[in-house]
Image (cartoon, helix red, strand yellow):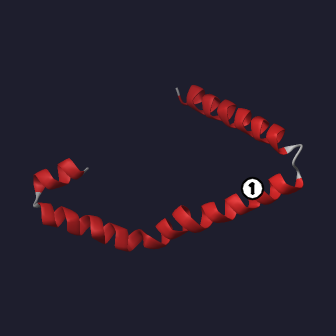
Amino acid sequence: MLGFCCQSSSFMFCMQRYVADIEKSWPVLIVCGGLLPLFVSVIWLLLIRHFVAAMPWITVALFNILIIAVTMFYYLKG
C-alpha cells in the first residue's frame, strides 16, 4: 500500500494518512495488541497452574481441532 499511495501523491501526504489512521484506530490497537492478550495469557497461566496434568493434552487437542477446522474451512471454500 505504501507504494501505491506514494505513487499517486507526495510522501508527506502518505505519512499524514498513516498517522490519521493510527489516530482513529488507537483504541483497537490498545485492546487487541495489549489488554486482550494480557488477559488471555493470565487466564492461560491460571489454567496451567490448576490443571497441570491435563493442560498439555488439552493444548494438543485444541491445536489439532484448530488445524482440522482450518483445513475444513479452506476445503469447503474451494
Q: Amino acid at mark 1?
A: Trp
Picture residue at 83% right of the left edge, 37% below the top: 57
| Left or right for 38, reference 4 | right
Q: Quadrant of residue 73?
A: top right
Q: How many marks?
A: 1
Count neighbours of disc 1 (C-alpha within 10 A) and say few if under 14, some if 14 to 19, many if 20 or more: few
| Left or right for 31, reference 43 | left
Picture residue at 47% right of the left edge, 66% below the top: 29
Q: Is residue 2 above or below residue 64?
A: below
| Left or right for 39, reference 33 | right
Per the image, the residue denoted by label 1 is 44
Q: Position of residue 41 (x, y in %)?
A: 68, 58
Q: Quadrant of residue 20?
A: bottom left
| Left or right for 1, reference 24 | left
Say which of 66 and 33 sits in front: 33
Q: Position of residue 69 (x, y in %)?
A: 67, 34
Say which of 45 and 31 sits in front: 45
Q: Position of residue 39 (x, y in %)?
A: 68, 65
Q: Is residue 51 above or below residue 42?
A: above
Q: Secondary structure at mark 1?
A: helix
Picture residue at 72% right of the left edge, 32% below the top: 64
Q: Is residue 75 above or below residue 56?
A: above
